[in-house]
Amino acid sequence: MALNWDLIGTGDSEALLRPRDIYAGLASRPWPYLRHEQGEVLDKWFDHRDDRHVVIKQNTGGGKTAVGLLIAQSTLNEGVGKAVYLTPDNYLVKQVREEATKLDIATTDDPYDPAFLTAQAVLVTNYQKLINGKSAFGVVGDGKEPTDLGVVVVDDAHAALTRTEDQFRLRVPTGHEAYGKLLELFAQDLKHQSANAWSGLEDKDPTALVPIPFWAWADKREEVLKILRPHREEQGFKFVWPLLAEVVHLCAATATSSAIEIRPSCPPIDRIPSFVRARRRVYLTATLADDSALVTDFGADPALVAKPITPGSAADLGERMILAPVALNPDLDDEAVRVLARQFADGDQDGDGVAETEPVNVVVLVPSDRATATWARYADRTWRVGDLEAGVKELQAGYVGLVVLVNKYDGVNLPAGACRLLILDGVPRPLDGVERREAVALADSTVRLAREVQRIEQGMGRGVRDGEDYCAVLLLGAKLGTAIHEARHLALFSPATQAQLKLSRDIAGQIKGEGLDAVRQALRACLGRVPQWRERSRRALAEVRYAERGTVRPEAVALREAFDLAATGRAPAAAERVQKAVNDLGGGDTALRGWLREQKAAYLHLTDPVAAQQALAGALNDNAFVLRPVNGGAPIQLKAAAVQSRAAAEFLAAQYRDGTGLRLGVQALFEDVVWGEEERSDDAERAWQVLGEHLGFASTRPEKQYGTGPDNLWALSAARQAVVELKTGCTTGTIAKKDMDQLGGSIRWLNDHNAEVEALPVMLHPSRVSDAKATAVPGMRVVTPALFEKLKEAVSGYAAALAGSPDRWADELVVREQLAHYKLTGDRLFTTYAEPLSPSS
C-alpha cells in the first residue's frame, strides 16, 4: 500500500514562526546550517519583531538576503499579513527570487498574484514598483483601497535612498512648454539670485544653475500649479505628480539649462499608505556609519534606527587589503597603476611576458562613461547597468580579465573568483540641481563627507561576499587616498572596514615612498594567500564589534519632523523645530548651521515673511552660499593678508596634520580641475578658491556668493587683486566674445566695489587666442592647460618641499622661501604661469 504523506505529520502542527526553525525544517537545505551571524540577527529580530521599524546591520556578504527572506516567511507564517521584499532594481529581484527558491520560499514578482494577495507568497519587487504616483499598492487620494501589508523588507536600504529620492523629484525638461512658462514666471527672482547664472540659462550653458528663492516659489504657488497641473497625466509627470501635488509649495526648485527640478527636502512618504502603515518595516543595511537618511527618506523612527540589530561579532567580513598608491607615494602615476592592473589580470605582474601567478578577474568601478576612456586600452569588457546581469554571471562563471563597471557602486555581488582585485577610480558625483547646490553650500560639512564615505564603502564591498572570501582593493586618485588617510574621513567608515584600513596602513607604512614594485609585492601577499597575511587579516577582525548604536544625526531628525509639521499646516512649529537643531549644533559646523537656518527661513516665510528674511540674513553670516535675501547685501571687500607666507602657513597648519595629507590635499585640488568637462565647473571653481588659500591669498567666489562678479577673486596684495574666470569646460579653439565680455564685466564689478585696488584680468581657457568678434580685456593673462600643468608641478613641488619634515608647513619663514623658489608669490605667479592674450589671426 502506498503511503499518503499528506496525512502524516501535518495534523495539528502549527506553522513554524522562528526564522531559525523555518530554515531547520527545510527538506533540502542549501547550506548545512545558517551562518552563526545570520542565526544571531534572526533570533534578535524575532524578539523585537513587533517593533514597527527594525534596522539589521551585517557586513557586506553577510547573508542579508536569506535573513530578509526568512523574516518575510516568518511574518507570513505568523499571520501578520502580506509580505513585500524590496530591492534596488530588477537585476536584484531575480537574484533574490533565486535565493528564495533555494530556501523553498514561495515568491512572485506580480503585485496582483493571488498567492501574494492571500499571503501565501512573498512579493519580490523593486522600490519603484511600490513608491510611485501610480503605485499598484495605492496612493493617497487615488480612490484605491491601499494594500494592507504585514511586513516590508527593504534590502540594501542605503542603495534605496537615491532611487526613493528620484521618485519624489519632478523634472520639467527644457523642451517642455512648462519649462519656459516657469522660467518666465521666476525670471526676476532668478536674476536677483545670480545675474551671471541667469545669462547662462539663456545661453543654454550646461553649468548654469540657479535656485528659485523659497519666498518666490511659495508666493506664486497658485501660478505654479496652473502651469504644472494640466500636464499631470503626461509620461514625465504622472508617476511623480500625485506624490508632490499637496506639498509643491514646500519643495526646493532649481533651474538649470536642461530642466527645472522640483524636490521636497524630505520625501512625503506618507503618500504611500501601504508602506507607512505596514505593521513591520525591516531595513537591511551594510554596516555604514550614518543611518540618518533612513529617517529623512523613509520616515523611520529615529529611536529605533539608533538601536540596530547586529551580530555579536563583525569578524564575518572577508579579507581585504586596501591600498591607495598615491597615498603611499604621491609621485606614483595612475596610468602605471592601470598597467599593473592589466598585468594582474594577465597573471604577468612584471610585464615580461612570463606569468608569475594565475590570471585573476580585475573589476574597476568608474563613476561615468567619460571616466571609462582612461581604461579603454586595458579593459576586456565594459559593462553598464543594462549589461550587468549577463556580465556578472560571466564573471561568476570563470575568468574574464579586466572588467570596467560604469556607475554601479552598490547591488553587485562579485564573490570568490569573480573579483580578486577591485579598483575604485573615483566616486559618483552629484547629478541633480539640488545635490549640486548642496555640494557647493556644504562642501566642508561632515554631512557631505559622510555621503562620500558611504559611497566609497559601498564600492569597496563589491569584492567580498562572506567571511571566507578575499579581495585586494586599490583606490586611485588623491581624493580616495585622502579618504583612507585623514582622521575625519576614517571615523565615518564602519568598524570592520576601519580595522582592515588600520592593517593596510601597517603595510603602507613599510612601503611608503616606494614604487609600484612594492605595491605589486603587497598585493601578491593577499592574492597569493601568504599565511602571515591571512593570519594578521583574521586577527585584525577577530575582536571587532559592531557599533552598539546607529548614527542618526539630530539635524536629520529635525528636518524630517519639521517637514511633516509644515506639510500639515504647522509652519511656525516647523521653523521652531529647525531652530532647536541649530541651537543644538553649537559652533562647530558653520556651513551646516547656515544651511539649516535657510531651511528655517523657508518655513517662517509661510506665516512671517519679514522674520524669514531676517533669519536668512543670519544664515548668510554662517554660510556664504545660501540664498541671497530679497534686499541682497553689498559684497564684502576682500582684504589681502598682511603677509602672504604667514597666511599660507596658518592655513596649512590648520588644515593638515602630516606631510602625506598635505601632498594629497594639493593633488586633490588639481584633480578637480578637469579640462573639457563643463559639468565639473563647480569643482574647478572651488578648487581654484582653495588653491589660493594654500598659497596665502585671501580667496573668494563672488559669483556664487553674490550672484554677480567673477568666478574667483584672489587678493594678491593690498593694492592688486586677480579677477579670475574659469572656462576649463570650454572646447573651442578661441576665446568667445561672451566669455571675454564676462571677464570685462567682472573687472568693472571689482572697480565698482573696490576702486582702491588694481584688477588683474585672468582666464583659465584651453586657448590664448581671442575670437575675432571679441573685444580683448586690457592686461589680460591666460592660464592654458600647458601652463596650468606647470603651475601644478610648481605647487606640488611647494607641497612636497614643505611636507619633507614635521611642521615645516607651519613655519612662516620656510613657507616664504618655498613660495619664492616656486614663483608663487603675488607679484610673480601670473607672470610665470599665465601668458598674454594673443589676437585672432
Image: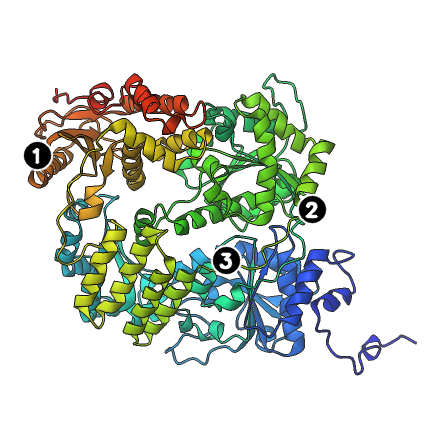
Q: Nearer the viewer, mark 3 or mark 1?
A: 1
Residue 296 placement: quadrant? bottom left
Q: Position of residue 248 (x, y in %)?
A: 28, 68
Q: Quadrant of the N terminus?
A: bottom right
* Mark 2 residue element: helix
Q: Earlier along the polypeptide chain: callout 3 or callout 1?
A: 3
Q: Is residue 664 above or below residue 549?
A: above
Residue 140 visible in the shown view: yes
* Crowd rating for badge 2 (residues with CA inside 10 Å; few <14, some 14–19, many 20+): some
The residue type indicated by label 3 comes to: Thr
Q: CA distance from mark 3 to mark 1?
A: 51 Å
* Mark 3 residue element: loop
Is residue 625 shown left or right of residue 342? left
Q: CA distance from mark 1 to mark 2?
A: 65 Å
Q: Position of residue 512 (x, y in %)?
A: 54, 25
Residue 754 placement: quadrant? top left
| Circle 2 residue | 542
* Mark 1 residue element: loop
Is residue 497 shown left or right of residue 709? right
Is residue 36 shown left or right of residue 818? right
- Residue at position x 37%, y 64% from top? 559
Q: Position of residue 5 (x, y in %)?
A: 83, 75
| Circle 3 residue | 551
Residue 413 visible in the shown view: no
